[in-house]
Structures are given as structure tokens and as C-alpha cells.
Image: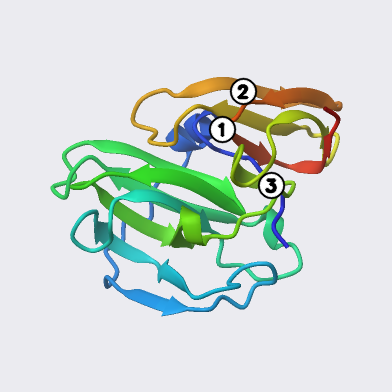
Amino acid sequence: MKRFTCILGSAILAAALSSHTALAENQDRGQETYQTAEEGYGKTDQEIYGRGSYVIGVDMPAGEYAVFTEDTSENHAFSSCTFTLYKNDRDEKKIGTFRFQHHGLITLYNGQHLILSRGYAVPADQADISAGTTGMYKAGRDMEPGTYRLTPLTSDGAHYALYNDVRYYYDYMDDYQTFFEPVTVTLEEGQYIELMDVSSVEKID
């Protein structure tokens, strides 16, 4: 069952972008097609890209991907996935290192170099994402547009970020907040929301 989780998108992403370093290990490139065992995922065969180094357009097609944590424990919604993205395969310009709770979304372009250090990637249109309390979601595809009430998990607070794009090498963030009490957020068609440390997501309009 997928959680409605929006953590480090580009905002939270930005925070995690600078504060987390990539495990820049060039692991063997590999691609598998299999059915995931995690509940709620893998209703059909998915194209899976595991830990490793990928040149986009050579080792995996360009497009939008969901990157998931590999954790299948009871608390997997709060586990993270991590990847690093470079502008080209010569690693001349690092776009950033990104960490998401449960899963994140990213659009990849031909020529970019992706290093998946923790987690696995699935084409977004195969990912079968449904609303939860952590992770990243696109309104109109993964959850309904509208107004939602978000409640933090603990007194330490929670975070959300809104994006109009998930390519990340420019700033496509529309809003970012750390909150300690329930807040309302309106999600427009086509917008992305990233959730971190949220305990409940309630649609109110």
C-alpha cells in the first residue's frame, strides 16, 4: 500500500540535495523485469532498474521515473532512496544528490548520468503509485487535485514541497513548508507534491 508521501522533492530536495552526498560507487549496470513483492506494487510486470550507474538513452530510456526504497519492512514508508544525477556521462556537472522518503519522481533526459545508490527505478507510468503519507505524487495521475489537510507525524514537524516539474536542474519549486501543526495545501492538476514525516493526508475539497 503506497503512502501519500512527499519529502525531498526539489524543495526538500534542495535541502537534501546539498546535505546528502552520493555513494558514488559505479556498480554494474543491470536491468531486470520482474513483479515486485511489496504490497500495492507490481500488479503487472515492471521494468526495474536496480542499484548502479546508467547513461540515459544508452542504459535506460529517457522519461519520468519513480525511484523507490528497497526496504520492505513494516516501516518502509519512512525509509529512503538516494540517487545522484549528472548533466552528462563525463560527470562534468553534478545536478544533485537526492533523497526521498519511500519514493521520489524524476524526469531524465538523454545524455544524463544517473547513479542509483539506494533504491530502484521504475518508469512512472508503470509504477502504480497511489496516495500515501510519504513520498512524491503527481496530481491527476497519482492522486486527485484539490485541497488537503496534512498532519505531522511527531512534534518534531513534517515537510511538504510543491513542484511544477521534476527535472531538478532548475528550480521548479512552487512552495515549501515545515509545519508542526496540521496545515492545508491546494494541489493543482499536473503539480507534484512531496511529503516527509506526515502522519495523515485528508482531502477536504
Q: Secondary structure at mark 3?
A: loop
Q: Secondary structure at mark 2?
A: strand
Q: Nearer the viewer, residue 44 or 88?
A: 44
Q: Nearer the viewer, residue 164 or 96?
A: 164
Circles 3 and 2: CB atoms closer than 8 Å = no
Counting residues from the N terminus, which is met first, the one under dot 1 or under dot 2?
A: 1
Q: Amino acid at mark 3?
A: Thr
Q: Amino acid at mark 2?
A: Tyr
On screen, residue 80 versus residue 39, left or right, reads: left
Circles 1 and 2: CB atoms closer than 8 Å = yes
**Rendered image quadrant of residue 129:** bottom right
- The label shown at residue 24 is none
**Badge 2 is on which residue?**
176
Task: Tell me the crowding category of disc 2: few under 14, some 14 to 19, or many 20 or more residues within 10 angstroms, Cα based.
Answer: some
**Badge 1 is on which residue?**
12
Image vertical order of residue 114 relative to residue 72, above or below = above
Quadrant of the rendering where the N terminus is positioned: bottom right
**Badge 3 is on which residue?**
134
In percent of the image, x 56 and y 38: which residue is there? 8
Measuring from the top left, give residue 201's x and y in whole percent. Answer: 80, 40
Counting residues from the N terminus, which is met first, the one under dot 3 or under dot 2?
A: 3
Quadrant of the rendering where the C terminus is positioned: top right
Counting residues from the N terminus, which is met first, the one under dot 3 or under dot 1?
A: 1
In percent of the image, x 26 and y 64: which residue is there? 26
Colour logic: rainbow
